[in-house]
Every structure is written in structure tokens, then in C-alpha cells.
Image (tube, coloured by chain):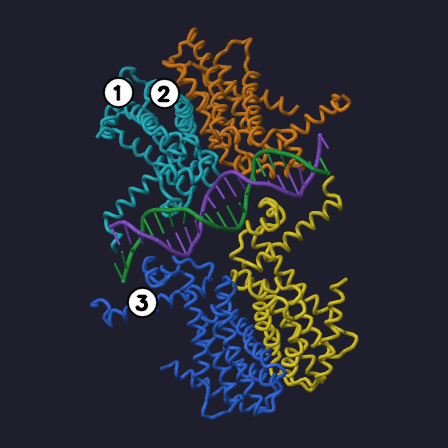
Chain colours: A blue, B yellow, C orange, D cyan, E purple, F green
Amino acid sequence: MYKTSKETQDRKDAKRQFILDTAANVFAKRGYHNTAVKDIVEEASISVGSFYFYFKGKEELFAELYLTIVKAFQDTSQKVLDIKNNNLIKNFTRVITANLWMYQSKRELARIMLIEAVGLNPEFEKKRSDSIKESCRTMEEWFKRFKVHNPVNIPDERIAALAFESSFYYLVLDWLEGDEVAKLTDSSYGLTVYNLQALKMPFEDEDIKMYVKEVLDELNQVQNL
Amino acid sequence: MYKTSKETQDRKDAKRQFILDTAANVFAKRGYHNTAVKDIVEEASISVGSFYFYFKGKEELFAELYLTIVKAFQDTSQKVLDIKNNNLIKNFTRVITANLWMYQSKRELARIMLIEAVGLNPEFEKKRSDSIKESCRTMEEWFKRFKVHNPVNIPDERIAALAFESSFYYLVLDWLEGDEVAKLTDSSYGLTVYNLQALKMPFEDEDIKMYVKEVLDELNQVQNL
Amino acid sequence: MYKTSKETQDRKDAKRQFILDTAANVFAKRGYHNTAVKDIVEEASISVGSFYFYFKGKEELFAELYLTIVKAFQDTSQKVLDIKNNNLIKNFTRVITANLWMYQSKRELARIMLIEAVGLNPEFEKKRSDSIKESCRTMEEWFKRFKVHNPVNIPDERIAALAFESSFYYLVLDWLEGDEVAKLTDSSYGLTVYNLQALKMPFEDEDIKMYVKEVLDELNQVQNL
Amino acid sequence: MYKTSKETQDRKDAKRQFILDTAANVFAKRGYHNTAVKDIVEEASISVGSFYFYFKGKEELFAELYLTIVKAFQDTSQKVLDIKNNNLIKNFTRVITANLWMYQSKRELARIMLIEAVGLNPEFEKKRSDSIKESCRTMEEWFKRFKVHNPVNIPDERIAALAFESSFYYLVLDWLEGDEVAKLTDSSYGLTVYNLQALKMPFEDEDIKMYVKEVLDELNQVQNL
DNA sequence: AATGAATGAGCGTTCATTCAT
DNA sequence: CATGAATGAACGCTCATTCAT
């Protein structure tokens, strides 16, 4: 019981997290299949034994990493939702912008989520598919609620949700290929307009621009704390 | 020159193609990294030596497979364009539908293109990125020409092209996960409407449905020949 | 019987020899182990089947090649011996010079004999050892005959023969490493003096130089025919 | 740093050395190309993984082995030089004898150095050529210094050095072919006389025999410690 | 005689994982 | 808790040889 003191536990947690972070960097740089456990432990300056003390194996660590990333994206989306003020256009814009901002501020994680996590093996594809489906289901609900009080035109909410969620894909891929300093959030307005129009939601250009600016300011502030 | 007769060459070509097809199936079923050359040759009932007689190696075969798939999609898109009749709405609908139809009729190839080909290694990512970029560039040109004579609203053609091209992604992914008999082309109308609206192109529901039906009939007829 | 006409047989022999020559070049350039049968047949513009029609296999061909080379060296040595004129110093000089000349004019064969044929496998080492032993035995006989009528000092003819025969080795190796135009025969005088002195045979510098010149003239003349 | 203790390091070094020794035996018995890594690890009763933990690969291990052998020969030559007593004849005899003694007491290494290391590949040939050249250069210097104060006759020191160094070759090769109990050092007197006479250095038979006996006694004593 | 497609044993090497210390 | 030596299944690939045509 001595050894499981809170202090010790904290140290363990910190080391675990450190390994996760290091692994994320290595995976992003070298790719999942080209990364050996040895690469990770060397980068983290720990022993293979330690690695296997904290994690069941390479695949398990990656799975945890992936789920953490997905959760971070979902959490950020949730956080930026202005629920009190039931402004759909505003919230829609905020979510899109927040997502782009996340990709931008966690470049390696974006790479892992969109590239390295794809096609690993059937079991992992299941995990990935589930997380995608969950996002789409959430959006589908949104769209259905949209319809009730708004003059939108969505023949099939499921298709719309799938199309909407994947509309980020090539945009982020393209950005990952390019210069690191390029601002992905600069595409926020364009992407928002594309998707708002796709739903036939009426909006004012100026509003969108304002919403984008607002949420970016908030996010950057939080980050700087 | 005994063996270089046309007949022999034809048999060689056929065998090569057979190996390619077999490999496609195995890759689709087991994934690129989980597929050993041994798996392919066993499935094709040939020897390892034969495999290496026809292909430089596993990676080269996969690359050829990938490029063939990409080309098949591009060719189909081109083929369904009704150039004489300069009806934008119609052509747009036809291209979307043809793409879905292709994914549907070449399920394994779809899986390879969208899942197995992702995150293989930097060189291959370059190939993949290039093929994506080319599709997007073509679409970007379309969008720019749209603007000239049509009441569309596209603040940024590049973003629109990227969003449009990727809008297929989750839809096909979702379909790949499900039952094989499910018809992906049933989503054609929904996806077309989503993207047409995204560009603010005015259209009639009935026209879209008709265009979808037309092109599907054409494609299925060609296939049955 | 038609087909085994002399003409046909000649054509077969010529082709066989052509393959042997081609193989010698390839072996010399790429080394025995780094040369595949495919390399030889490509260089010779024949098919693998033909190769195996004329030769039992790669190893057999190489063995034949090796024995041919050894025989060529022995024959040349025999040919330059001036038997009528029983001048030991002269004949000794002529043999040494002729050997160097052979290495020089058949550079690839030298490489094969001294480098590529070494350490292939136990059976081949036996062949090689036998050919070396034969040369040494011949020389041993010479030395024994020397002793009878000459004021030489050879405590052990076997050792002397082995030392004499191997005295060429590093010299040729060094030459093989260097420029192709360098003349190996320029070392003839030096090597002859070394070995004559080693046997304590009295000689005149000028005679040696003359003998070297003579035999080189003869050899070069024969070659030019 | 548990495992980095001196004791552990010593065990690692010992195992590494054990693998090297085992590999030397296997290479000597089966030849380089006919030896698979599997053969070595089986003989050493270790796993393939262990082999690759201690060595980069088969080729690297062999190169290390070769360089170690070459160094051992050079070191022994150096060690037997009686520098204080500037007796050329004595030192010359001691070096020749020490070399033969080395070949004799390290039979497998001799085989590796003279047979298995030959014709492996161009890079390795460079290594081998370099080590030979170094030995020859050393001997060339000796010969040049000989000339200053001695009545020797060496028209070309380079040729003499090459001839001298290679004079061991067939002698050792012949011994390697024969019975293991045969004494190679019995040829020391004969070989020394051959080379001393080749340089026209005046000497007394009895001195040579004494020098040979002396150095062999020394070497055998050291070995028995 | 000539061809070259077909074979498959065998190779060197990697790396996720274990476990004695 | 930490270490890193040890394991061995599995991989992609080569190439001497065969044989139906």
C-alpha cells in the first residue's frame, strides 16, 4: 500500500502519458508499420521492459492513442457548442471551425487519425468505423432537429451526415501534405459555406465570418493558458 | 521465338491478370500488411517463383493495382459525361452516380483504394495524394466554369472541390462495412442533392432522379455485355 | 546421322565455346557467386534452356572453365621451354615470363583462376588443390634435376616449389587491382631474379633481360597471328 | 542500469566472442557461402534473434572475423621482433617462423583468411587487398633498410615484398589440405632459406635453425600459460 | 535444338514479445 | 519497477534447375 500512494501513482501516470505522447510523435513521423517498439522506447529513453509494463503491446497503445484523439475531437466539438443560445448557424460554424483548429494544432494526431489508423487490420477498422459512425449519428440527429424548425432541404439525413463528416477529409489531407505553417483554419469559412448550402440553410456571409473569428479567438486563448 | 508467339503472349497476359485479380481479392480480404506473398500465391495456386516472374514484388504489384483502379474510376467518369448536351446538372449527377456504381461493382477494389492503400509508406502516400489532387483539380476547373454561366455560389473552388471529392468517403466506407447486397447507388440521389445544393445550383428533384436512373441503366447494360 | 554431320557438330562446338567465353567474362566482372545463370544467358543472348543443353549446370561450366585456364597456362609454359638448348637459367626465365604474359593477356581468366575459383566449396577446392599440386610437382622435379649438375642450394625441393609457384600470387593480385594498361610483364625481371637467387643459381643480369625480351617477342608475335 | 553492470557486460562480451569463435569454426568447415546463419546459431545453440542482437549480419560478422585474424598475425609478427638486438637475419627468421606457427595454431582462421575470404564481393576484396598491401608495404620498408648496410641484391623492393609475402600461400594451402597433426613449422627453415637466398643475404644454416627453435619455444611457452 | 515459364527450397533479416535478474 | 538479452515465427525474395512445347 506504501507503493500505491497517490504520489507514486501520479508518477506512473505521467510516465505512461509521456510514452503515449512520444509514441504519437514517432507514429506520425514514421508511420504505424514502419515504427518498431524499439523506435518508441529509444525516443522516450526507456527500456522495452518498461514499455510492456505500461502497455500491453504496440497495437494496444495505438488503439488507446487513436481513441484518445477521437475523444479530444469530440470534446472540443462539444465545448464550443453554445447551447444556451440556440443559434444553429452559429453552432454549425463553430463546430466546423473547432475541428479544423484541432487538426491544425495537433498535426501529428491528425496524421495518425486520418492516415496511420487506416487499414491496420479488421479489428481496428471496426474501432475506426465505430468512431466515425458515432460522429455521423450525432450529426444525423442535429440534421433531423434542423428540419423541424428550419427551411432546410435534406432528403436523407444519414447521407447528409456522412457527406458532411467526410467533407473535411481531403482538405486536411491536402494540408498535411503541405507546409506546416499554412493555416488550415483559413479554409473554415469556405468549408462552412459549402456544407451550410448543402443543407440549404439560409445564412449571412458576415455572420459566418464573425462566428469563425469568435471561436478561433476563444480556442487560441484557451490554448495559451 | 517459339514462345513469343501471340498465343503464348496472350496466355502470359491472362495469367498476369489472374494474379492481379487474385491479389486484389486477398488484399481486400486481409489487408495489405496482413497479406503475405505466400497468401496470394496459394490463393492463385501458383508458385512463389511464378509470382516473381510476373511481378517485381509485393509492393510493385499493389502499386499497379492501385493505379489501375484509379484509372478505371477516372475513365468511367469520363465515359458517362454527355459532352454534346452541355447540361451541367445532368453531367454532375451522372458522374456522382457513375462513381458510386463503380465502387459498388468493384467492391474489393473500392476497399483497396479507400482503405488498404492508405498509410502504406511515404512513397505510396505520394502516389495516392497525386491521384487525389488530380481528381480535385479537374473538379476545380468544372466549378470555375460553372460560375461563368450559372447562378452558383462557390467562395473558394479549391475547398469546394476537396469537399466534393471527399464527400463520397464515409458513404462508401459505411457501405463497405455493411451487407454486400446493399445498393450503394441508392444513395446517389441524396449525395447528388447534397453537393448540388452545396454549390447552390438550381435543380429539379425529378430531373436528378431521371438522370440517375438513366446512367445506371446505361452502366448496367454495358456491364452485361 | 544427318544432324550429327561434321558441320552441325562444328556449329555446336562453336556455340558451346561462345557460351564458355561469355561466362568467363561475366564471372570475371561480377564474381562467381554474384553471377546468375540468367546473367550469362542474357550476355550471350541465348535461352536458359540452351545453357542447360550445353552444360550440366553453373558449377560444371565453371569447373570446365577453370580447368581450361589451368591447362592454357601449363601449355604456354611447355611451349616456351627451349628443350634442345638445355639452358636452365634461360628456361626458368622463359617460364616465369610466359606466365606473367598469360595473366596479362587473359586478365579475366587470371581473375577467375586466382580469385573467383577460391573457396567455392570443398569439391572444387580439391580440383584447385590438385592443379596447384601438379604444377608444384613439375617444378619440384625441375629443382631436383637442377641440383644434379648445378651449384644451387635447395634444402627442400617441395618447399622451394611451393614458394616459387606462389610467388606470383600477390604480384598478379596487385596488378589485377590496378590499371588495365599497366604491364605485368615489366615485373618479370624482378620476379625471376628473386626466385633464381632463392635457388642460389648463378646468373648474369644481362642474360635474364635478354631472355625476357626474347620470349615476350615470341609470345606477342604468336598472338598477333 | 541493472544490466549495464560490469559483470553483465563481461557476460555479453564472452557470448559475443563465443559466437565469433563458433562462426569461425563453421565458416572454416563449410565455407562462407555454404554457411547459413542458421548453421552458426545451431552450432552455437543460440537463437537467430541473439545472433542479430550481437552482430549486424552475416557479412559484418565475417568482416570482423577477418580483420581480427589479420590483426592477430600482424601483432604476432611485431611481438617476435627482437628490436634491441638489431640482427636482421634473426628477425627475418623469427617473423617467418612466427607466421607459420600462427597458421598452425589457428588452423580454421588460416583457412578463413586464405580461402574463405577470397572472392566474396568487391567490397570485401578491397578489405583483403588493403590488408595484403599493408603487409607488403611494411616488408618493402624492411628491404629498403636491408640494402643500406647489407650486401643484399634486390632489384625491385616492391616485387620482392610481394613475392616474399605470397611465398607462404601454397605452403599453407598444402598443409591445410593434409593431416591436422602435420607440423607446418617444420617448413620454417626451408622457407626462410628460400627467401633469405632470394634477397642474397648471407647467413649460416646453423644460426637459422637456432633462431627457429628459439622463437618456437617462446611462442609455445606463451601459448601454454 | 531451342525456348522461357514454372518451380520451391532456401536465404538473410526483422521485430513484437517475454522473463530472469 | 526497470532492464535488455533472448526468442523464433514470419517475412519478402532469389535462383539453379526442369520440362512441356
Q: Are marks 3 and 1 on the same chain?
A: no
* Residue D6 image offset from top left, x and y in percent: 23, 49
Report the chain holding disc 3.
A
Q: Residue at x 55, y 10 (%)?
A: C83
Total marks drawn? 3
Label 2: which residue? Answer: D191
Report the chain holding disc 1.
D
What label does residue A15 carry, if any? Answer: 3
Identified by mark 3, the residue type is Lys
Instruction: Inspect this view and state whether residue A204 appears.
Output: no
In depth, the one of D127 and A162 nearer the eye is A162
* Residue A20 image offset from top left, x and y in percent: 38, 67
- Establish if A18 lies above or below C219: below
Report the chain holding disc 2.
D
In depth, the one of D39 and A210 nearer the eye is D39
In depth, the one of D19 and A142 nearer the eye is A142
* Residue A109 image offset from top left, x and y in percent: 45, 70
Identified by mark 2, the residue type is Leu
Kindly check if marks 3 and 1 are in contact, taking CB atoms under 8 A apart as contact.
no
What label does residue B65 carry, if any? Answer: none
Q: Are marks 1 and 2 on the same chain?
A: yes
In depth, the one of F19 and B43 nearer the eye is B43
Mark 3 or 1: in front is 3
Kind of element beneath mark 3: helix
Label 1: which residue? Answer: D213
Is the N terminus of chain A in the top left, top right, bottom left or bottom right quadrant?
A: bottom left
What crowding class fits label 1: few (fewer than 14 Cα within 10 Å), some (14-19), or many (20 or more)?
some
Task: Residue lying at the far right in this picture: please name it.
Answer: B84
Identified by mark 1, the residue type is Lys
Residue at mark 1 to residue at mark 2: CA–CA distance: 14 Å
